[in-house]
Image (tube, rainbow, N blue to C red):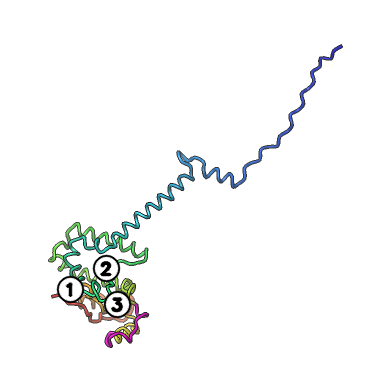
Amino acid sequence: MTDNTATPAPAAPETAPEKAPGRLRRLWRWFWSPSGTLSLGALLIVGFFGGIAFWGGFHTVIEATNTEAFCVSCHEMEANVFREYRQTVHYTNRTGVRAVCTDCHVPKDWTHKMIRKVQASNDLLQHILGTIDTPEKFNARRLHLATNVWRAMKTTDSRECRNCHDFIHMDWSVQEKRSAEKHQEAVKNADTCIDCHRGIAHRLPAGAQEAADKLWRELSNGKGAPVTTAPSSGGVAAR
């Protein structure tokens, strides 16, 4: 007699549960997982190279505005102060070392340079408005403009002057007697370049000494220091 009882199939071997991906792998998958249409990693890569391109373009524009050619591209500068500057030792001298507009009027360090660039936007506005677009208008405001520059130099301890000139590195023995005496006196009194050297690159406006005295008194009072007047400048007076 035949036994028709079916033989049970052997049980399938148990499989180990799939191991969860490690933390580093999960982070990698998240980094490259789609976010909208692009993965986060792709967005960061595009942003990185886009940032480099933006910074390069921004830096190029900033440096282009620091050239002498840019400064004198406005006729207000070319027809007035630039012509005066060309007659000074800062433009031509025996060593051939020149100081252009931005060497004296734009800070070197990034923070103060950006502040100055923002402030310079007012220069563009005044150019558009035609505030000083004729020699007559320019000369009428020359004292006001000069006083603004003196104020900036006085309050920053003639920072831009010191990019080239520094009391510490001066050799008194090779200077003329009067210059050596004055410079040593300035060191002793903690004076700064603009205290004496006004009008060395541009013609001094009428009333310059009185305006400087008033500014020096204002700044001295603001610091609680004794009231002082500005030393007489060796610059060229207005005719």
User: What residue type is disc 1 on?
Assistant: Pro
User: What residue type is disc 2 on?
Assistant: Val
Q: What residue does disc 1 label?
A: 205
Query: With respect to residue 7, does 163 lie above or below?
Result: below
The residues bearing labels 3 and 2 have C-alpha atoms spaced at a distance of 18 Å
In the picture, measured across the screen, residue 239 lies left or right of residue 40, that is left
Q: Residue furthest top?
A: 1
Q: Earlier in the sequence, mark 3 or mark 1?
A: 3
The residues bearing labels 2 and 1 have C-alpha atoms spaced at a distance of 21 Å
- Residue 49's spot in the image, x, y percent? 42, 50
Q: Nearer the viewer, mark 2 or mark 1?
A: 2
Label 2 near label 3: C-beta < 8 Å? Answer: no
Q: Specify whether residue 2 is painted magenta.
A: no
Q: Main secondary structure of the magenta part?
A: helix
Q: Earlier in the sequence, mark 2 or mark 1?
A: 2
User: What residue type is disc 3 on?
Assistant: Cys
Q: What residue does disc 3 label?
A: 193
Q: Residues within 10 Å of mark 1 (few under 14, many from 20)?
A: many
Quadrant housing the C terminus: bottom left
- Residue 162's spot in the image, x, y percent? 33, 74
Q: Which residues are magenta?
A: 166-179
- Residue 51's spot in the image, x, y percent? 40, 52
Q: For numbered disc 3, what is the local secondary structure?
A: helix
Quadrant housing the N terminus: top right
Q: Specify whether residue 176 is painted magenta.
A: yes
Depth check: give the residue in front, 223 or 172.
172
Q: What residue does disc 2 label?
A: 100
Q: Residue furthest right?
A: 1
